[in-house]
Amino acid sequence: MRRAIWKGAITFGLVYVPVEVLPATQGERTGFNLLDRRTLDAVGYQRINKRTGKPIQHDAPAQAYKSCRREHA
């Protein structure tokens, strides 16, 4: 159901014309799944420690950035 962005009226002397402005587009989300190219089976997302190869808990990762500075010897 669309909702009006603005409601108002235009008057011409004794004539009262109600006006509503409605959005011209509707937002929709499109979701995509990753598939295995060979079997077309769905591929899941798993958080894995790159050094140990073991999965980690969903709330365990911390955010960081990779430094571009190089250490001089």
Image (cartoon, rainbow, N blue to C red):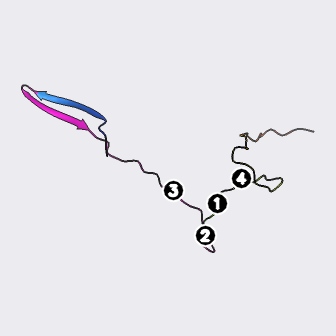
> Type of residue at label 2?
Asp
Please name the residue shown 32% across and 42% down the image: 23
Query: How busy is the neighbourhood of tag 2: few (under 14 within 10 Å), some, or many (20 plus)?
Result: few
User: Residue 27, which numbered label?
Assistant: none
Instruction: First in sequence, mark 2 or 3: give its number.
Output: 3
The image shows residue 29 at horizontal and vertical percentages of 46, 51
Instruction: First in sequence, mark 2 or 4: give its number.
Output: 2
Q: Secondary structure at mark 1?
A: loop
Instruction: Kindly report the secondary structure that dominates the magenta region of the rendered protein.
Output: loop
Q: Secondary structure at mark 2?
A: loop
The image shows residue 36 at horizontal and vertical percentages of 63, 69
User: Residue 47, which numbered label?
Assistant: 4
Query: How busy is the neighbourhood of tag 1: few (under 14 within 10 Å), some, or many (20 plus)?
Result: few
Q: Secondary structure at mark 3?
A: loop
Q: CA distance from mark 3 to mark 4?
A: 20 Å
Left or right: where does residue 14 sit relative to residue 43? left
Q: CA distance from mark 1 to mark 3?
A: 14 Å
Residue 43 sits in quarter: bottom right
* Residue at which label 1 appears: 44
* Residue at which label 3 appears: 31
Q: Residue furthest left?
A: 14
Please give the range of residues in magenta: 12-41
Residue 59 sits in quarter: top right
Depth check, mark 1 against mark 3: the one in front is 1
Q: CA distance from mark 2 to mark 4?
A: 19 Å
Please name the residue shown 28% across and 41% down the image: 22
Labelled pair 1, 3 in contact (Cβ < 8 Å): no
Q: CA distance from mark 2 to mark 1?
A: 10 Å
Please name the residue shown 62% across and 71% down the image: 37
